[in-house]
Amino acid sequence: EVQLVESGGGLVQAGGSLTLACTASGLTSDEQAIFWFRQSPGSERDGVSCISTFDGTAHYADSVKGRFTISSDNAKTTFYLQMNSLKPEDTAVYYCAADLFCGSYYSGSYIFVDPDYWGQGTQVTVSG
């Protein structure tokens, strides 16, 4: 059974940094992509970033490019989202998710698939 547990959320001032962690267990060869999604009140859940556990390729939403970095530990059991230069609009519940692959490019932007497995989420609040 795939289990994903997020941690590291909290309150941070605009311009600050925060690192989220996702501890994964039960991953199989059918889950080679780990995602970070986010959802703010009244909005849809949006893809933020994804990393391939196969080759480490990372993809980002346009809104976070250059500010957020996704990574994993060597064992590929813990995945991180380093968030820098945070803005109030980054305030959301952040979810870790897993699926076979990340998605694809369309018209210059990366479109993430809708993953099969989800964590419970961790709240990030950026005060401005």
Image (tube, helix red, strand yellow):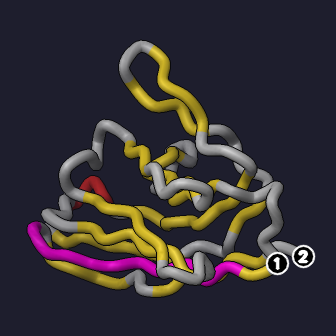
Is the residue under label 1 in contact with that under label 2 (CB below 8 Å)? Answer: yes
Residue 55 pos. (x, y %)? 53, 54
Location of residue 27 in the rendering, given as x and y in whole percent from the top left corner: 78, 71
What range is drawn magenta here?
15-24
Q: Please name the amino acid that badge 1 sits on.
A: Gly
Q: Residue at x 22, y 60 (%)?
A: 88
Q: Which mark is residue 26?
A: 1
Amino acid at dot 2? Glu
Compared with 60, 2 (above or below) is below
**Residue, disc 2:** 1
Please state, as top left, top right, bottom left or bottom right, where the N terminus lies in the image: bottom right
Say which of 73 and 70 sits in front: 73
Residue 12 is situated, as x and y percent measured from the top left of the image, at: 22, 80
Q: Tell me the residue at 60%/43% (across/down).
A: 102
Q: Tell me, yes or no, whether the highlighted magenta stretch contains residue 30.
A: no
- The local secondary structure at tag 1 comes to loop
Query: Is 22 colored magenta in this rendering?
Result: yes
The residue lying furthest to the top in this view is 107
* Residue beneath the point at 19% across and 76% down: 17
> Residue 113 falls in which quadrant of the image?
top right
Q: Residues within 10 Å of mark 2 (few under 14, many from 20)?
A: few
Residue drawn at (42%, 13%) of the image: 107
Mark identifier at residue 115: none
Q: Quadrant of residue 121?
A: bottom right
